Image (cartoon, rainbow, N blue to C red):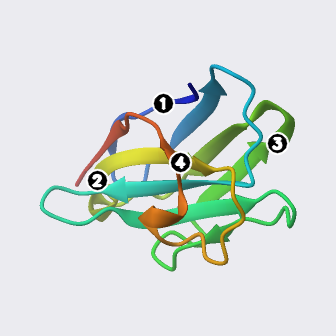
Amino acid sequence: QVQLVESGGGLVQAGGSLRLSCAASGRTFGSAAMGWFRQAPGKEREFVAAIRWSVGSPGYSDSVKGRFTFTGDNAKNAVALQMNSLRPEDTAVYYCAATRTYRASLYTVGAYDSWGQGTQVTVSS
């Protein structure tokens, strides 16, 4: 069974930076795309960034564009999210996700079939 394992969350002051990492473990898993989502208390899980390996260029939500950078290694099924200029509204549990199937849109939770356990990011003001 494929497992996605995130690491790198924590507590940081506004304006600071954090780097999240995610790696796939378990049986060999060839993904078509991987992404990051986040969920704040009382809110729905929302798209942050994703990469379709066949394209190579990541896409971002408007709320993080210019501040977050998504990098990935297709051969290792590993991705990272560098988060700079963090704001209190970035506080959430961040989830790594992957799909083995081509999806027309990578912006929805339903596009992914594997999820990590989540890592907490807290930004203090």
Q: Amino acid at mark 3?
A: Asn
Answer with left or right where residue 30 lies relative to residue 15.
Answer: right
Q: Earlier in the sequence, mark 3 or mark 2?
A: 3
- Distance CA(mark 2)–CA(mark 4): 19 Å
- Distance CA(mark 2)–CA(mark 1): 14 Å
Residue holding disc 3 = 74
Residue holding disc 1 = 8
Q: Amino acid at mark 1?
A: Gly
Query: Judging from the image, what secondary structure is the residue with disc 2 in?
Result: loop
Answer with left or right where residue 53 lies relative to residue 109.
Answer: right
Q: What numbered label is drawn on residue 97?
A: 4
Which quarter shows the C terminus?
bottom left
Q: Earlier in the sequence, mark 1 or mark 3?
A: 1
Which quarter shows the N terminus?
top right
Circle 1 or circle 4, nearest the eye: 4
Callout count: 4
Q: Amino acid at mark 2?
A: Thr
- Seen at 53% across and 48% down, the residue is 97
- Distance CA(mark 1)–CA(mark 3): 20 Å
Residue holding disc 2 = 91
Q: Earlier in the sequence, mark 2 or mark 1?
A: 1
Badge 3: few (under 14), some or many (20 or more) residues near its Cα, within 10 Å? some
- Percent position of residue 72, x then y: 75, 45
For residue 22, above or below residue 99: above
Q: Amino acid at mark 4?
A: Ala
Are the two marked residues, 2 and 1, in contact with CB atoms closer than 8 angstroms? no
